[in-house]
Image: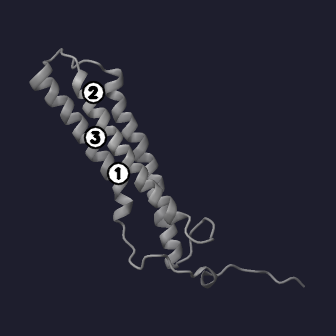
Amino acid sequence: MSERTEIRPEDNAEAPPDERVTLWLLTFGPAIWAVHFVLSYAAAAVWCAKVAGRTGPLADVRIVIGVLTLLALIGIAATGWRGWRMHSFGNATAPHDFDTPADRHRFLGFSTLLLSGLSFVATVFVALCVVFIRSCA
């Protein structure tokens, strides 16, 4: 007779490094993307309306949007790295479906990582507008 081993939540009960579980980190990637989106389009709109005119070039504002994009991508990558560290905490494997503090910690880390990846791609797509469109018209 072979004995069947079952994984129980009590076996995976190591505590995460921080006691307070917060959802704020989960929102950082999309929030950085949203701020980048608004600032990029506002900068282009103000540039075209006040400086370059309707058919003028986007020359200098492209540099500004490039710097904004670089800063946003660094912030999103840092958030994703933090999510990865939360996800890879301990020695458990996915799925993180037990009702333990450690699995909740890992699940929030995985969700943060995925949202950061999506925000990274969305930020690149926002910046591609000024790569392909060279004038205000």
In the rendered image, the vertical position of residue 7 relative to residue 126, given as above or below: below
Q: Of discs 1 and 2, which sits in the foreground?
A: 2
Q: Earlier in the sequence, mark 1 or mark 3?
A: 1
In the rendered image, the vertical position of residue 77 relative to residue 99, given as above or below: above
Q: Secondary structure at mark 3?
A: helix
Neighbourhood count class around disc 3 (C-alpha, 10 Å): few under 14, some 14–19, many 20 upward? many
Give residue 37's mark. 3
Q: CA distance from mark 2 to mark 3?
A: 14 Å
Location of residue 112 in the rendering, given as x and y in whole percent from the top left corner: 44, 58
Q: Secondary structure at mark 2?
A: helix
> Viewed as shown, does residue 86 lie left or right of 21?
right
Give residue 62's mark. 2
* Residue at 52% in and 68% down: 106
Q: CA distance from mark 1 to mark 2?
A: 22 Å
Q: Earlier in the sequence, mark 2 or mark 3?
A: 3
Tell me the kind of residue under disc 1.
Pro
Which quarter of the figure is the N terminus placed in?
bottom right
Q: CA distance from mark 1 to mark 3?
A: 10 Å
Location of residue 44 in the rendering, given as x and y in whole percent from the top left corner: 21, 29
